[in-house]
Image (spheres, rainbow, N blue to C red):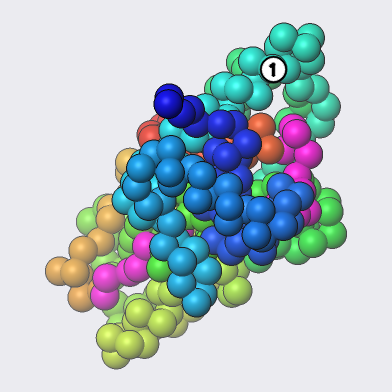
Amino acid sequence: MSQSLEIDLLRSFVAIAETGVLGQAAARIGRTQSALSMQMQRLEAVVEQPLLHRTGRGVTLTAAGERLLVRARELLRKHDETLAELRGEQLSGVLRFSCPDDYAVVFLPYLLRGFASLHPRVQLEVMCAPTPRLRELLTRHAIDLALVSVPGDASGAGIIRHEALVWVAQRGGAAASLDPLPLALGAPDALDHQLPRRALEAAGRAYRLAYASSSLSGLIGMARSGQAVIVLTRTAVPDDLEILSSSHGLPDLPNVGVTLAFDRDEPTALTSAFAAHVRKFLPAARPSR
């Protein structure tokens, strides 16, 4: 007897993949954990292979599960858009979206242009701030969702993309050779401030904080002046600045993960549609400069 991928099963599967916890997934879709487990058994029977690893800390995806997740998100998006079109519905309203400055410079034009072409009646309001400030805004429900940074090895964070942190300075400048190393870093509670300092301290490299600001333009200005070394995501480095390597006596920096955070457990249809758009296109996004 032929079997098919039911939309309800795929929606439950995506909820599990995004939360990593059966209880949270069940709450999101309005089912009990036992009902959700039975759905996953049915789905695994349809595809004839395991999709989930169940551990004491939650649920992770098998290799087959990872492949299905990509297809499931695409199928759900097309299903929901088709149903809305047939019903004569079209997304509209105001969406409040935020992200750090360096993500805005690189990814925003790519993401917003694509979403506007799909949903021309949606008004997007964009605010830029470091990740700690964005989480405060989400807690106050001042924004609907935000693109935020998390440690690159964070489990269960729903990481969409990884970004390399790099040391950056004036091309051919001498700042990297100074002792102590002059640094210009972002907000003190942000990862791009904390991770470089930890790396330098672990390597025994002396440094001094010459400038601290959440302003991307201010940090880039310090680098261009030759007065300090800064830290950026690799994709956000301007062409006139130099990415420093280990030959400059600087330790390697870890990656950060890029993920979405929401102001509520059950996002609106508009917020969910934009989140689905980001998850689909951000992994393949190229710098806009």
Q: Which residues are magenta?
A: 251-271
Q: Is residue 29 left or right of residue 235?
A: right
Which quarter of the rendering shows the N terminus?
top left
Q: Is residue 248 left or right of residue 199?
A: left
Question: Does the magenta run of residues contain 237?
Answer: no
Q: Position of residue 250 (x, y in %)?
A: 25, 74
Amino acid at circle 1: Leu
Q: Residue at x 60, y 74 (%)?
A: 189
Quadrant assignment, res 137: bottom right
Quadrant assignment, res 53: bottom left
Q: Residue at x 66, y 53 (%)?
A: 35
Placement of 177 over or under 115, stated as above or below: below
Nearer-the-camera pick, 53 or 150:
53
Residue marked by disc 1:
83
Residue 174 in view here: yes
Which quarter of the rendering shows the C terminus?
top left
